[in-house]
Amino acid sequence: MAPAGDDPDQPAASHAWEAADGATAWTDVREDGEGNLLTSDAGLGLSSRIRRRRRRLLEADAARSSRRLVRHMLRHVYLVLDCSRWSRERDPALPPARTRLETILGLASDFVGEYYDQNPLGHLGIVLCRDGEAEMLTSLGGGPARHRLALSAATSAELSRGGGRPGAGGEFSLQNGVEVAGRSLGHAP
């Protein structure tokens, strides 16, 4: 026996789309602001809730927003320092008794402290470049004391290196410095 209101000559529809009149099917379809097609059936409530939730989570995502703070992220950083002959010159913009090299190594020591203050779980390594070659001063590590100690030893060693003769320190090679750092980052996640 057919339910009330159904045509006895038509077979019973097993899907909602089979029972729908073809003339009104496209009038129930809308397009949202992102170009997605929406229908006016009961599933619209669930899909719109899911879209709203995704949009809310996307807006609250600090990693994708323009905020500077990103939590739960480990950083692996190599500091590549120039110890070439050009860094051994005196710069008129610096205090009279300091060379660029002294300034570079002093600022690098300050950077180490600031880096670990802002990234307590981060790892830092230092690479020195001189004579067209790169040398690993410190490998990736999680404590500032080792890096500061190595920088102070490098400062005294670099300043005594070459005995003040012109050309001591050679050329700077950023490519070699990046390659040395990259090889040691091969095991990092």
Image (cartoon, grey):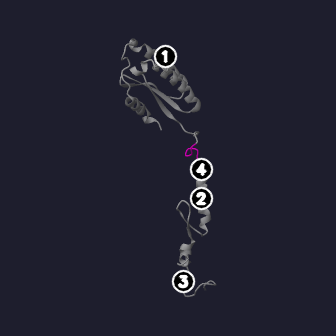
- Report the residue marked by disc 4: 59
- In the picture provided, is 111 more to the left or to the right than 168? right
Mark 4 secondary-structure assignment: helix
Instruction: Specify whether residue 63 is painted magenta.
Output: yes
**Which portion, as a residue range, is magenta?**
57-66
Question: Which percent across, then down, holds residue 57?
Answer: 60, 51
- Separation (CA) of disc 4 from disc 1: 49 Å
Mark 2 secondary-structure assignment: helix
Question: Which of 176 and 150 lies nearest the eye of the viewer?
Answer: 176
- In the picture provided, is 176 more to the left or to the right than 26? left
| Sequence order check, earlier mark of 1 and 3 | 3
| Sequence order check, earlier mark of 3 and 2 | 3
Q: Residue at x 49, y 16 (%)?
A: 98
Contact (Cβ within 8 Å) of mark 3 with mark 2? no
- Separation (CA) of disc 1 from disc 3: 95 Å
Q: Quadrant of residue 19?
A: bottom right
Nearest to viewer (mark 3 / mark 2): 2
For label 3, the crowd category at 10 Å Cα-Cα, with few meaning under 14, some 14 to 19 and many 20 or more, is: few
- Report the residue marked by disc 2: 50
